Every structure is written in C-alpha cells, then in structure tokens.
Amino acid sequence: MSRITDLNMSIADVCVMLSDNNPGALTVVMGIVQQAKTIDPDSVMGYLGPLLDLDTLELYGPDIWILYKDVCGEDLVMILGVLRARQLGLITDASVKAAVAGTEVLDSSGLTGNDCQRRGRWDSIYMHCTVRKSTSPRRRRVRLPRLASTCAAE
C-alpha cells in the first residue's frame, strides 16, 4: 500500500518514509532528490516522479538499497533509467520487483557508455525490451532502453 498519501508532505517526511530508516536507502533517496533534475531534466515532476514510482512499486528501505546497489550497480543514472523504463512501459513492475528479489536480472548495458546519459535524454525509438535467459535457470534478463546517442549534439 502506498505510503505517500499526501502531496503536501515535506520532502524530509517522504525521504524518511521511503527509506524505512535504512541509511543506505536514505542516501539513495536523497541522491535522487538532489540529482534527478540534472540526470532526467525531462521528468515532469522532477525528483518527486521517481520517489512516487518507488512508492507505487512498494519498494522501501532495504529494497531501495538493493535496487541501487545490486540491480543498478550503485549508479543513480541506472536507477532513474529503470524507473523511467518502467514508467514508459518498457519493463513491467513485476520485472523490477523480481530484479530486487534476485529472480531476474535487468540488463542495463543500454544505459552505460554514453556522454548524454548524465543529461537524461531517454531514447524513444527503442520501444521494446528483450528478455534473455541468464546463466541461472530461475533468472531472466530484461534489457533496458538505450539512451539516445544524438543528444550530445543538442
């Protein structure tokens, strides 16, 4: 069940509520608050969008830390990319939750190695995710969308 029930809550209350007093999760949530506008300037709701996404997915405390550390390789660009891909319907809620639970692998190779990734321009052409079998029979890979390679010229 959603914990952010009132959009008039202070940002401190939202951060503490999402982090469940987990210091790692609090660090991630504060990083999102501080850097979301720089990483994803096209986000209509700024830093609040990704925080609402975490709440909608019911990812709190240790789950946020696992998403950041294990699934996204300690990269805020990756975590915001995963949340944006989910928002665009490129990956499902179940895939994100399964990745946090360790039963799926999100292949984030499409979100690395691009100068414009820090600017957050997500490629709207790459409209599907491929699902590949991983080495473990119980896990599957979900490829995330690629970042636009032309945004550096903007």
Image (spheres, rainbow, N blue to C red):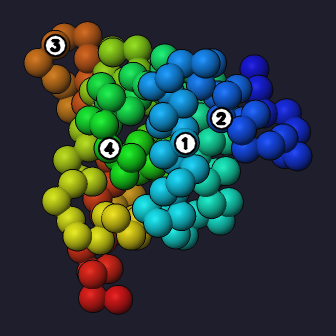
Q: Quadrant of the N terminus?
A: top right
Q: Is residue 87 visible?
A: no
Q: Are marks 2 and 4 in contact (CB under 8 Å)?
A: no
Residue beneath label 4, please? 75
| Quadrant of the frame with the C terminus | bottom left
The tag on residue 15 is: 2
Q: Is residue 142 above or below residue 49?
A: above
Q: Residue at x 34, y 64 (%)?
A: 118
**Which residue shows up at 39% across the image and 58% down it?**
127
Q: Name which residue type carries label 3.
A: Ser
Location of mark 3 (residue)? 136
**Category of crowding for the residue at label 4, using alpha-carbon neighbours closer than 10 angstroms: few (below 14), some (14–19), many (at least 20):** some
Location of mark 1 (residue): 30
Q: Earlier in the sequence, mark 2 or mark 3?
A: 2
Amino acid identity at mark 1: Met
| Residue 88, x across and y down, in percent | 52, 53
Label 2: element kind? helix
The amino acid on which the numbered mark 2 sits, given as a three-letter code, is: Cys
Instruction: Answer few, some or many: residues within 10 Å of disc 2's Cα (few below 14, many 20 plus, some between 14 and 19).
Output: many
Q: Position of residue 12 (x, y in %)?
A: 72, 38
Q: CA distance from mark 2 to mark 4?
A: 18 Å
